[in-house]
Image (cartoon, rainbow, N blue to C red):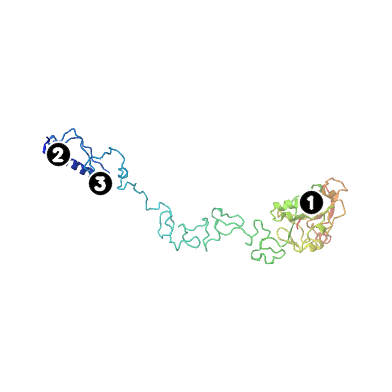
Amino acid sequence: MKHPGSLHITLGWSLMVSACSQRGDAGGGQTEPEVTSSPSSGTGVDPTTPIPTTTDATGLVPTTTSGAADSGSPSSETGGADGNAESSSSSTTDGSTEDCGNGVLDPGEMCDDGYAANSDVDGACTLACQLPVCGDGLVWQDHETCDLGPNNNDTLYNGCTTECTAGPACNDGQIQGPEECDNGADNGTGKAPDGSASCDSGCRYEAKLVFVSSEKYTGGEIGGAGGAHLKCQSLAEKAGFDNHKGFKAFISDAYFNPAENFTHSTIPYVLPDGIRIADDWDDLVLEGPNPGITLAETGAPLLAHRVWTGTYPNGKKFPDQACANWTNSTPDPDNKARTGRTSAVANEMTQWFEEKQWVSEDSLGCDWKNRLYCVEQ
């Protein structure tokens, strides 16, 4: 028969261990150290009997094994009572402008005048909380005319300069880029400087351009009237004339002559620099160009130079072979063509005008190299 005190001692020991274990569970996942020694022999407990670490509601030791996962238990790795990882977010912006507009100079901001004052148009602080500067792509009202950001360029036609002012453009009073003329505020009004022609709102003369070719050709190198037209068009294109395909040579052959095949302009004829040489077609053929067609498409002055025409002053074909329709350069006394001269030689101005020598002065052998008159249609 057992000693009466053994049961009480055993039960008391179990309850004490259970209570300690429960306090350990409530302490955030910490566990009690394993008991490695038995109670003293004075307790009456058999030292070979395992000591339970906890009991369930019935007072019996649970059947779960040590180390098994408990889905309802907090993990000792989280460091939190609810088992979730602690947040690592910060209240600072770390250089961002997410708080732009709050009126406070936050990290990453150059300015902040608040939601009502920040503006990409007329504010001293942009909507991105940056100071307005030329090159930011925003046009600052009353301070900048334009702003194309990285595309600002000091020479680009119709562009924006690196000072955020308008670049070269039509109507600014300066001839630039593809312009023929630019009379500023007078463009499109019909007004014209003395001795010139009016300029339209697109910076083109309200007139027809005329020039003498910078290149010289033998009679046979021309390749007929058609070849002469192509040469004029090529030179006009190289010079940047936007209507370069509209040019034709003032020349005649068996198939072409200016009197019958040119547009008889009702507006003035001008040189590339804007000097008016005739008021219209009738003035050109009846009076001749005054002071002469003396400017090349390049702008170079060419005074008293000979020009292949094969044409009478009235624009019709001169009755000779015209270098076999401008295909033969053989040096033969019978192989000739009519020539004009861009302006009078010294002391012969009156004769040059009266005899219309601009278009019909002399006949020369086709092996000579002469120029061409090119007229916009």
**Disc 2, SS:** helix
Q: Residue 246: x, y in percent?
A: 74, 56
Residue 280 in view of the camera: yes
Three-letter code for the amino acid on which mark 2 is drawn: Leu
Q: Which residue is mark 1?
A: 226
Between marks 2 and 3 in the image, the one whose residue lies nearer the viewer: 2
Q: Which residue is more in the foreground, 248 or 370?
A: 248
Q: Which residue is more in the foreground, 105 or 370?
A: 105
Q: Which residue is mark 2?
A: 7
Q: Quadrant of residue 4?
A: top left
Tell me the distance, in whole angstroms, between the alpha carbons under discs 3 and 1.
107 Å
Q: Is residue 73 left or right of residue 102?
A: left
Q: Quadrant of the N terminus?
A: top left
Tag on residue 26?
3
Between marks 3 and 1 in the image, the one whose residue lies nearer the viewer: 3
> How many residues crowd around disc 1 within 10 Å: few (fewer than 14), some, or many (20 or more)?
some
Q: Quadrant of the C terminus?
A: bottom right
Tell me the distance, in whole angstroms, between the alpha carbons under discs 2 and 3.
29 Å
Residue 296 in view of the camera: no
Q: Is residue 57 left or right of residue 157?
A: left
Three-letter code for the amino acid on which mark 3 is drawn: Ala
Q: Residue 166: x, y in percent?
A: 58, 59
**Residue pushed farthest front?**
1
